[in-house]
Image: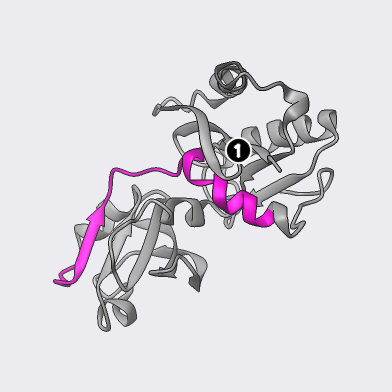
Amino acid sequence: MKTTILCLETATTNCSVALTVNGKVVSVREENSKKHAHAEKLHVFIEEVLHDAQIGKKEIDAIAVSKGPGSYTGLRIGVSAAKGLAFALDIPIITIGTLNVLAQQVKDQVDFIIPLLDARRMEVYGAVFDNNKNQIRDIRAEILTPSSFAEFLGTGKCIFIGDGAAKFRTVSDFNNAAFLPDRYPSAKEMGELALDKYKIGDFDDVAYFEPFYLKEFIPGK
């Protein structure tokens, strides 16, 4: 049986859309722009991946969307699009943690995977996963210091991934820390995670689901 899921990732500067069949990516479009062009690009990318795969909207079984933490505006755009499509097509919505999506990019054998997203100044959104991609520490908004993550760095090899990893590299002096700072969450890594949730009926409420902001929104000047 074929399961087709449309995956949306808009939590960071990377606007990313992937169409997956049985967990495998069949078409993807993404653009990483500091201008946060999600509002202009997202629906265009959705139409492009469907056209590329020759799959109609009525063939989609579910919509998966990155739920945060991340950019307030990016998350709102992604979740609003996911809700609109899910409601119009009468299909379920599946939400996936942004840091979980980012952690999927690590292929090296390490003891701990620590995805970090830039949250301005020396603050990041971070979580900790084991080598099997199981989350073993809660998601936190934290200010980086030389002793951050010492309990993990002191016991095994750690790989830090995401735009927040570049910040930690400037203050960390642990020898067993590796860094992948130029990586962003991508819809390409959402397919298998979404399929696992689809199989067990782990859906979110289309009407009432809200993104996981982690911090209060503070408007700029």
Q: Secondary structure at mark 1?
A: strand
Q: Determine if the magenta segment contains residue 189.
A: yes
Q: Is residue 215 left or right of residue 197?
A: left
Please name whichever residue, 186 or 61, is drawn nearer the observer in this view of the structure: 61
Quadrant in which the N terminus is drawn: top right
Which region of the structure is painted magenta?
172-197
Residue situated furthest front in the rendering: 1
When asked about the image quadrant of residue 167, the answer is bottom left
Residue at (82, 30) in percent of width and height: 89
In percent of width and height, residue 24 lies at 53, 41
Residue 220 shows in this picture: no
Q: Determine if the magenta segment contains residue 162.
A: no
Please name whichever residue, 10 or 168, is drawn nearer the observer in this view of the structure: 10
When asked about the image quadrant of residue 159, the answer is bottom left
For the image, the number of numbered tags is 1
- At label 1, the amino acid type is Val
In percent of width and height, residue 110 lies at 29, 69
From the image, tell me which residue sits under label 1: 21
Residue 204 shows in this picture: yes
Residue at (56, 17) in percent of width and height: 48
Residue at (33, 82) in percent of width and height: 151
Residue at (70, 35) in percent of width and height: 82
Q: Is residue 19 left or right of residue 36?
A: right
Could you classify mark 1 by the number of other residues whose Cα lies within 10 Å: few (under 14), some (14-19), or many (20 or more)?
some
Please name whichever residue, 217 or 38, is drawn nearer the observer in this view of the structure: 38
